[in-house]
Image (spheres, helix red, strand yellow):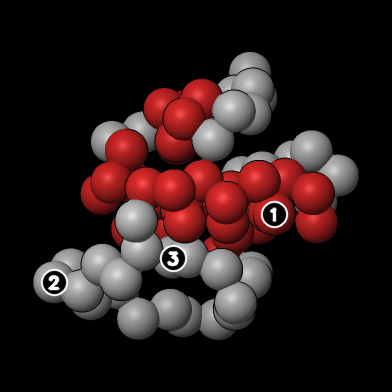
Amino acid sequence: MMKNNSPFINQYSETQICSHLRELHRRHNGNATPENLDDEDDLVETSIVMDTFGTWENALVQAGLEAETH
């Protein structure tokens, strides 16, 4: 499913994004990945997470989650 990746609208605060990441983590049994986020229609877009925090790992740290090591 393709999400709207509009670069000029960010309706989410950092706190809200972190909340969404924690919910993603819960829904996917601790596996909060960009790919899993892309499958969720009711959570923040992956591009917004990346634009806000720079890296996925930084976003997870800010959300209080441990980044997965690959």
**Direction from residue 44 to residue 53 in the image, left or right:** left
Q: Closer to the observer: label 1 or label 3?
A: 1
Query: Badge 2 is on which residue?
Result: 8
Instruction: Give percent across and percent down for residue 58.
Output: 41, 27
- Which residue: 13% across, 72% down? 8
Q: Which residue is at the front of the view, 56 or 23?
A: 23
Q: Determine whether the residue tagged by mark 3 lies in a helix, strand or loop.
A: loop
| Image location (x, y in percent) of residue 11 | 30, 71
Residue 12: x and y, percent?
A: 36, 63
- In the image, which is nearer the foreground, mark 1 or mark 2? 1
* Amino acid type of the residue tagged 2 in the rendering: Phe
Q: Which mark is first along the chain, 2 or 3?
A: 2
Q: Nearer the viewer, residue 21 or 50?
A: 21
Question: In the rendered structure, which amino acid carries the disc numbered 3?
Answer: Glu
Q: Which residue is mark 3?
A: 45
- To which residue does mark 1 refer? 23
Q: Is residue 42 left or right of residue 25?
A: left
Q: Quadrant of the N terminus?
A: bottom right
Residue at 86% over, 44% down: 29
Assign a secondary structure to mark 1. helix
Against 3, residue 46 (above or below) is above
Q: How many residues crowd around disc 3 within 10 Å: few (fewer than 14), some, or many (20 or more)?
A: many
Q: In the visual, does 49 lie left or right of 66?
A: left
Q: Residue 23 occupies which quadrant of the picture?
A: bottom right
Of the pair 29 and 14, the residue shown nearer to us:
14
Residue name at image x 79 percent, y 38 percent: 30
Separation of marks 1 and 3 at Cα, in angstroms: 13 Å
Between the residue at mark 3 and the residue at mark 2, the CA separation in whole angstroms equals: 13 Å
